[in-house]
Image: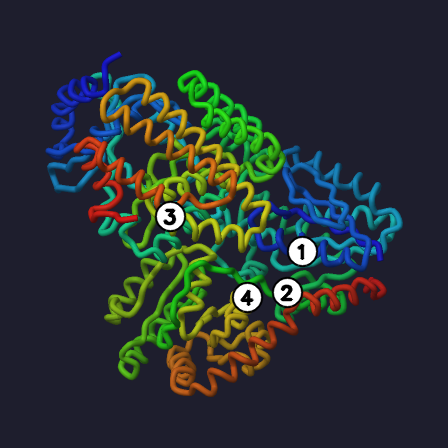
Amino acid sequence: MRTWAVYRDEELQRVTPLLRELGLVLDDEQVHTRGDRALFSGVQDVGAGGRKLVLTGSRIEDGKRVVIKATREEGGKRELERERTCRRVLRGLNFARNTFSEPEELLVTLREGYLIVVSEYIHEDLTLLEHSIEEQFFLVVRALEAQEGVHVTTSSHALAIESAFGLIGARDYLERFQGFCREVERIKTSNAALARTLVRATEFLKHHTTLIERYCGFLTHSDFSPQNLRIRDRRLYLLDYASMHFGNKYESWARLMNFMTQHNPTLERYLAEYVRANRGEDEYLCLRLMRVYKLGFLIQLWARVARESEGAQHELMNERVAFWTTAMEAVLEDTPVPIEVVRVFNEATHRLRSPEEKARQREILMRKELRV
Amino acid sequence: MKIVLVTSLYPPEIDRRAAYVKELAERLSASHTVTLIAYASTSEPVPGVRLITISKRRWLPVRLMKCLFTLFAQARGADVLLVEHSVAALLPAIVMRAFTRIPVVVNYSVGEAWERATQAKCTSRSFEDYLAHPEGTAWIRSIGWLERILLKRADRILVPLLALCDMLTQAYQLPREQVVLLAPPADRALILPVGGSRAPHRLMVSTPLLPWKGIGTLLEAVSELSHAVPDLELVIAGDGPERPTLERVTREHSLTERVTFVGHVSHAETAHLRHTCGIHVVPTTRDELPFSILKSFEAGIPVVMSRLASSRETSREGTLALLFEPGDAHDLARAVSELLTQPDLRSRLSEQAHEEVHHRYSWPHHLHSLVAYLELPCAS
């Protein structure tokens, strides 16, 4: 299999003239094809998990900014089709209380074996993290509540969504988590502390499967993080519908809060306080369970990449495994990750990241320097 | 008393009625024997209450039969069946009643057919208009037909507003004594991790953007007031088919600097907007349930609302909030101006409204009234 860099360069060369024929021109800089993007190609927590190019450009006729997804790999095509199916099904659900705004789909076509999907580019004046902390809190809660408003309760609901989205329950979460643990054990056999933490986490999940199951059946986004959220004119746009499924309602919360552990601990704290104060101890516990689950995914992801990388990237991946293990321990203890630990990790990340990845992160997260 | 409570909505379902039923069951169980039968695929336990769930994943006829059999098994010796209104909960209860004569009391807040039609976007009418002009698919219309038949056979129907009493008795030809008022408990106030200071000249409205909600009237009032109150602003929380029209009206009145459409927002953000505004305006031209208004009363936010039967009732004839003629922008501007320029009036209304919520719309008062109705001989 071609490395990501080879895949990217070859596919770009092939697809660029096709896009021109379709009246599209690419930006000179394609940040979404570089940096850590390579690590995620084909990796999918939910969905088909295929490789594809995600490009930015403009329509020649009117200069309209666009996002172009293009692939000729079967896995990539399945993922794109899944995303389109999920969007279509969600629009048609009669039990969805409120839906999200979504980028307008401008073109879908097959050209010389490539499936090409073009949608509007949602320009943001400010990324999520560039808003005030209060605005960030309300924006994310808005998106999370919108997901919670889509809840499968009856057999007709389940029938409407199961084939498009999939419906997972407590047993699935536990089995997947155990799979993460087995993978980590295989890779990091000498890390006894990590092994103990994962054992403890597994017991934590096993002990509360009834609680996890209770809050399943909700629309959830497995990669709910700022890179998949756009804000324009106070409208929220959710991206990457292929990462949506019906599962535990706190899975989205968990992904976001784990992300904020590193990037905005204050927001992490606000969200935790909000759930605990207004939804009760059971739901707060469910949130912690989902955070542990999502941290398991992260740890196994970075452990796998660490094994396949070298030099600065290898060191960075090991730092990530260590940090997210600390985060998992903190969630198990229901304590915050010490701010000094976060600061040290962010400094290490900044030091070890490639310039390409730094550029990609700036585009996604923050154009200003973020200080924790 | 032995009370059997039947409901189609139960936590973890996201609906205020689901949370209400759970809390009601728990509070009733302090003094009575309560069995709760809930259509639910998963459920939150409630201490002191025998909870029996019937999975919603079953085929509808199967779950209706299961509910009926469960009622027969559980309701022996029951003094009353208290049904949280829905056809799926009421139908088995009425059948049970035919065999056992156990009275059926319905806790009614909104029509199911209208609610389904609204969610399916088959109608944008208010509930009041919908009763006169039902719309929707054949399935929705059949639910409406069943509602009418089943409600006639209930012993008592409890509604949260007198205005709703009148609507139902008229629309369904029900005896007046069958439909009675039960003031609902106010929703619990959200605890937010973020604060904010109150902007005294900020108006707020939170509602779906539909033609009969009166937002156009509010925009005209803001336009009229803007010269006298240079820093007047309006935040409109909500979304709907009327939005493009309202945005156009905003531009035409040169109000784009004063008026902000924030779209559909979360409960948390609505609470925040409420706490940071100076006045909550409810310009609807149709009778509505009071829950949003009660939240403002609870938060000490002065309220201006259109003079309708429901708002006259909720505001106690204008002693808890200021009223204006529906559709009359000048009268609305007058009411807002009074609140902006008379701090004593604002304080008095807020204090009285806050006290009202903690008395008439409190859980103890609600329970006391409910139990009194349950203990009364049947209306039929």
Whether callout 4 and callout 1 share a subunit is answered yes
Q: Which residue is mark 4?
A: B288
Q: CA distance from mark 4 to mark 1?
A: 23 Å
Residue B338 visible? The answer is yes
Residue A109 visible? The answer is no
Q: Secondary structure at mark 1?
A: helix
Q: CA distance from mark 4 to mark 2?
A: 16 Å
Q: Which residue is mark 1?
A: B23
Q: Which-is-in-front pick, marks 1 and 3?
A: 3
Is A191 on the left or on the right of B131, as rendered? left
Q: CA distance from mark 2 to mark 3?
A: 37 Å
Instruction: Give me the residue at 33% from left, 75% from top.
Output: B222
Q: Chain of mark 1?
A: B
Rendered location of residue B51, percent (x, y): 74, 44
Q: Secondary structure at mark 4?
A: loop
Q: Which residue is mark 2?
A: B185
Other residues around mark 3 within 10 Å, as few (<14) / some (14–19) / many (≥20): many
Q: Given contact means CB atoms under 8 Å apart, are the residues at marks 2 and 1 in contact?
A: yes
Is A210 on the left or on the right of B282, as rendered? right
Q: Earlier in the sequence, mark 4 or mark 1?
A: 1
Q: CA distance from mark 2 to mark 1?
A: 10 Å
- Between B127 and A329, the residue placed more toward the observer is A329
